[in-house]
Image (cartoon, grey):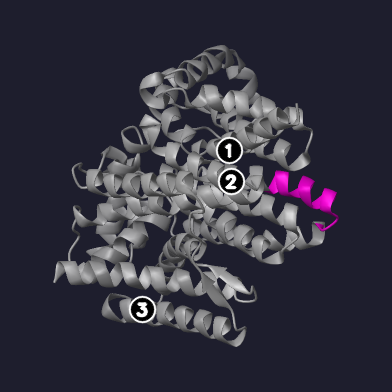
Amino acid sequence: MIAVGLVAALVTIFLAGFGIAIWIFARADRINLIECACLAWLFGCGTISLLLWFCGMFCSGLFLQAIVTVACLLFAVLGWRAKRNANARFDLPKPANITEWILASLIAIEIAVLIFTSFKHTLGWDGLLNWELKARYAFLNDGTIPAAYYSSDGRAFSHPEYPLGIPFTELWLYLWMGEPNQFWVKIIFPLFYAACAPLLALLVSRLSGKRWIGLLSAALLPFVPSISASPGGVVVGYVDVPLGVFYLAALGYLLLWFKASDSRFLVVFAACSALLPWIKSEGIILWLVIVLLGFVLGLAKRRLGQFVLSLAPGAILILAWRIYLRLVHLSPHSDFVRPSFGALRDNIGRLGDIFGILFAELSEAVHWSIFWLLAAVALIYLFASRKLERIALASAVIIPILLYSVIYVFSTWSSYSAHMTSSIPRLLLHVMPVGWLAIGLALSQAKRETQTL
């Protein structure tokens, strides 16, 4: 029964997200089946978790599960009807030559290996105490988290202020399995990787015009040690890799919108960027970065009004979560003081140590191999191209890293250096997929320059 429940939970997540994805692309003559499958997992997890959170304010138990299930099926039906009414056809892109076949096969093998490896590991510390704990607590309370959880000082260690995107996706599996099974819930995280790799290949291929470079970028993705191991990798149940996938999707479709002026790409951007703050608190920083870059691109495209409209879902979700935390009387607790000029003046001397720790981590081969060296070369190429969209991509890698580092100026830990050492490797995972996007575009640019010479 557990296996049947697990399959049902995953199918409903996929159906909800797939319905939304094909609804977005319904007016295209051909709908890329791989693209919709990848986006289906992202949209599905976001939809399920938001429905559980919102509907859980008014109902619980089997009634809550039934309402969310019906909503998922409704999304699937609406998407299918939109496709049928538009006479769109599904298209399954196939490798065009032996090189592409080899790379595509390697990506498939890597996904299978990571899924297998995930079940050989237990959930990590944060995976248990910050994320799975919320899912378990909600399951034991008929699918909702009681307000007392947020206001209890004794539970402050589990960060009640963290959003519920991943915990409530885990909760959905628990509701269908009928028990909080920590073994099977781990399937969520390699599935995010399974969405990330093809999506990375697709985005690099479209932006560079070379499919083999996109496939190569995706094939090299798991060779970064941190993607498959602690701290924060796929196998330990942390949310850093899922957040990185949403950031990749949001930025990639923003760049596609700038390149092609297709409003469908902007809709995907609006959905993925809105879910950034719903996955982890740091997602607000990534949302602000991508908003800034989008303003610049929108101005250059002379479609600023259209871009501003796409920010509404993210702004509404951020505001709704803040209001909710205030209504449930969140117990004030934070690893950081509120940023202010006074605190910055008092702790400005930390910056030397902070950037020293950052450089040491970027150079740590055990965590990153030579990834950041490749990324640094790629960023130089992108800045040298003087093309606005490629400069925006390079900035999307650099700005979050700088902001993540500077925030430790406001750390409340007795040792801010220990605070940074323990968490910065996970924060860098947020921009790592975008780093591979930058490497792929730089590689295509370098190859084009070589052919010109």
Which residue bears the numbered disc 1? 440
Q: Secondary structure at mark 3?
A: helix
Mark sitting earlier along the chain (1/2): 2
Which residue bears the numbered disc 2? 204
* Horizontal relation, residue 265 to residue 66: left or right: right
Asked if the residue at tag 2 contacts the one at tag 1, i.e. Cβ–Cβ closer than 8 Å, the answer is yes
- The N terminus - image quarter: bottom left
Q: Depth check: give the residue in front, 51 or 246.
A: 246
Q: Report the predominant secondary structure element of the magenta stretch.
A: helix
Which residue bears the numbered disc 3? 69
Hey, which residue is sitting farthest front in the picture? 98
Asked if the residue at tag 3 contacts the one at tag 2, i.e. Cβ–Cβ closer than 8 Å, the answer is no
**For the residues carrying marks 2 and 3, which lies nearer the camera in this image?**
2
Mark sitting earlier along the chain (1/3): 3
User: Amino acid type of disc 1?
Assistant: Gly
Mark 3 closeness class: few <14, some 14–19, many ≥20 residues within 10 Å: some
